[in-house]
Image: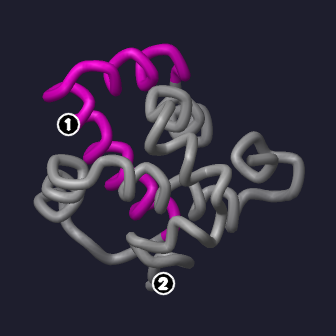
Amino acid sequence: MTDWSSGLCGCFENVGICFKAFFCPCIVAGEIGEALGESCFWHCFASTLWLPGVLNGAENRGKLRAMYQIPGSYCNDFLLHLCCQGCSYAQEAREIAFRMPAGGSMARS
């Protein structure tokens, strides 16, 4: 088991990802979906709607946790996306950039 490579409020570790997560969250949601091997469009679209965006974000956070063996729970994932979706998207995107081999889409941010 590992932990997240950066904290939930570690936005200044990658300012580019931070700005995208807060000002264009649909782009970050789509990139996270692509990193999970899923449709960029669906994740981008779902993030523009309130409840589907929260549910989809929580589900994707759980998939990332499973992929990288990070402890946590769906309830925590849901609450993070409900209360601070921008911070959650930014942390997930930083995690993908940190763990993805060079040349991956999130690493270029």
Label at residue 55: 1
User: Label 2's element?
Assistant: loop
Which segment is the magenta one? 39-68
Q: Quadrant of the N terminus?
A: bottom left
Residue 100 is left or right of residue 101, and the answer is left
Give the residue pinned by disc 2. Answer: 2
The amino acid pointed to by label 1 is: Leu
x, y percentage for residue 2? Answer: 48, 84
In the displayed structure image, the side of residue 92 where residue 45 appears, left or right: left
Q: Residue at x 47, y 62 (%)?
A: 91
Task: Please determine whether, in this image, residue 35 is positioned above or below residue 8.
Answer: above
Looking at the image, the residue that sits furthest to the right is 103
Image location (x, y in percent) of residue 59: 28, 43
Q: CA distance from mark 2 to mark 1?
A: 24 Å
Q: Residue at x 56, y 46 (%)?
A: 19
Q: N-terminal of the two: label 2 or label 1? A: 2
Which residue is drawn at the image coordinates 11% and 59% (left, top)?
A: 75
> Relative to 74, is 71 above or below?
below
Residue at horizontal 59%, vertical 69%? 12
Give the camera-side residue of 37 and 106: 106
Say which of 68 and 46 sits in front. 46
Taking 88 as reference, is 24 left or right? Answer: right
Residue 40 on the magenta segment: yes
48 lies above or below 30: above
Which of labels 2 and 1 is toward the front?
A: 1
* Amino acid type indicated by mark 2: Thr
